Amino acid sequence: MLSLTRVAAISSGDHGAGGNEQLRGAYVPGICKICKANISYKGGSTANFKRHLKTRHPGVSLGEVRRVEEASPEAPSEAPLAGSSQQQQPSTSGDSRGRGQAMGQSRMTQFMSRPITPQRQKALDEQLAKMVVWDLQPFSFVEDRGFKAFTKALNPSYTLPGRKTVSKVLVPQLYASCHASVKERVGHAAAVCPTTDCWTSRTTHSYMSVTCHFVEEYDLVSCLLDCFQFSDRHTADNLSEHLLRITREWEIQEKVVACVTDGASNITLAIQKCRWKHLHCFAHTLNLIVRGGLKKLADTTDKVKHIVDHFHRSSLSAEKLRATLAQMGLPDLKVLQDCPTRWNSTFYMLKRFVKLRDAIITTLALVNAAVSTLTHEEWEAIEEACEVLQPYEEVTVEISGEGYVTASKIILLARGLQRLIASHLRTGRFKQPVVVSLLTALNGEMAKRFHRIESNTLLSESSILDPRFKRKTFSDDQAANDAIQRLTNAAAQATISDPSQQEALVEQGAAGEQGAAGGQSTGESMIWGDFDAQVSGLVSHANPGTEATLEIRSFLQEALIPRSSNPLTWWKSRSVIYLRLTRLMMERLCVVATSVPSERVFSKMGLIISERRSRLSPSKAQQVMFLNANLR
């Protein structure tokens, strides 16, 4: 970019036999080939050149200047010396280059893009594969024109892999490494709680998902074990066979404390064949309860569905509704249609319908739609029904989480809903007859499904071991006492597998023996002999049953922690105090309340098997889903 002109003059003195020549050199400023500015050049240093490039021409590349030079080469500039007729010539001497390099001169190649190294290419390929599985992109997007141009602009040296390379090389490699990492994590778990569900894709392929939940370093974590094509009939034998196969592959067949599924008869029998404890999905139970109650509101909800369907089919009515909302100063919202299998979608539909009440009434009158409108009593019934169903929606959202303890809340939430509905019936707060029928139906459904919930082994023991609830969970003292007795027996038989807890247990035993000896030798003594003989039958020796009883008694006497606190954090601070109960906590608080995690897998599978990737094979969809769920 910069032209340095060196002018040399040869003296006119005699030349000796040895051909001696006397050279005199003088330096003139360097000339920038872009702006023709003169740059000082002294002692062979190029610092001024570099500073000029950065400050005056930061956006100009060396390649552009060279292309300009090749198109219109410039003649070397000439500047005669005073008293001399010699022309200046560009310096190409090797000593000049050597002198510049010795003084730390930067090479122009440092400003040029270099070929990418194999290690860097591999790292970028891995990040590309992660982007594909994280963002659920189709493999063909690496061949899209826009993405190729964008990648080229970011790094011209990077060679973008093709679709087949991503599908057959990069994603399988990433799957293998992620699978090994997840298997190692699951292998360290003390106990696991799987959930499972089945689903049919838009390509009519049936899939079965299995998720796993466990306590890891006193945090509740979840991972996807498998989401595979299930082409067999959904019989109990086939379901149990695949469930057992997955647990064997992941080496957790002895760690399963309970499996959470919906209440279908085939999966219920399959869990029995696996000889696992079975916990029905609480969200599914609530769905059945509310669906049964909403039958009392069927006539009104059918009218609402027809009106919503009208707005979805008629662009004229939909546009008129938007204009009406704008005139009323209301937000631009759309009416929602419900899903027959999810009660909360009906709740969201009714809630939105009530919110847009005035705009809907006005729009239907303006367009003269051929639909049955709602009466004043029906509008009032919908408003009251939304108020009745609001607590069920709150409970459904709270128990559907994966990152916090949920099973210990089920008894309290179930009893809370029962008390609330009973209070509504007793006070007569709601006046619409159809809403009263809804309350009666909900009360009957809950009485049928929750009547023995406090006797459930998993739920009662989880509640006792939750430092937020303990005995306060129960309205039946006998159910609480039975749960405490079961925990005491289990704690006495618990095996301490954590090395740190084993050391603490040994230290406690040693401290007890030392304390019993009063810090003195436990050997025979002439002075203490008579006393030892008299009290030998009265001295108690520690045993697992006693230790378990003392642990759970001490645990129950501690104050409750706030409901918003994390019970696992509390247990982390008490792990060296309650050694046996900590082991039981790992087995009880890892249980989740719902099978929603498996259903969430299918929600993402619906995005993976989309119109752009409908030809994706089930095995490849399995790998992508596994990576999306587990890759960190």
Image (spheres, rainbow, N blue to C red):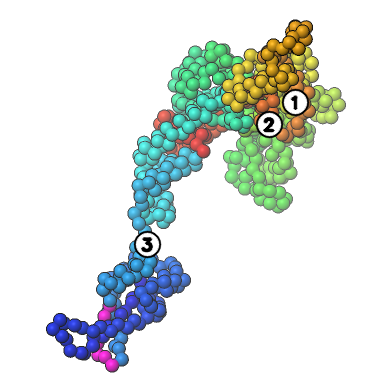
Q: CA distance from mark 2 to mark 3?
A: 56 Å
Residue beneath disc 1:
469
Residue at the image point whose x is 70% and y is 35% from the top: 350
Residue 507 - label: none
Q: Is residue 446 visible?
A: no
The region drawn magenta spans 83-90
How many neighbours does mark 2 have within 10 angstroms: few (below 14), some (14-19), or many (20 or more)?
A: few
**Residue 489 image position (x, y, % from top left):** 68, 13
How many neighbours does mark 1 have within 10 angstroms: few (below 14), some (14-19), or many (20 or more)?
A: many
Q: Nearer the viewer, residue 289 or 623?
A: 623
Q: Is residue 559 above or below residue 491?
A: below
Which amino acid type corresponds to the residue marked 1 in the rendered image?
Phe
Which amino acid type corresponds to the residue marked 3 in the rendered image?
Gln
Say which label, 2 or 3, has the lower sequence index: 3
Residue 110 - label: 3
Residue 573 - label: 2
Q: Is residue 320 above or below residue 562?
A: below
Which SS type dominates the magenta stretch?
loop
**Residue 592 image position (x, y, % from top left):** 63, 25
Which quadrant would residue 473 be assigned to in this image? top right
Q: Nearer the viewer, residue 383 or 315?
A: 383
Q: Nearer the viewer, mark 3 or mark 1?
A: 3
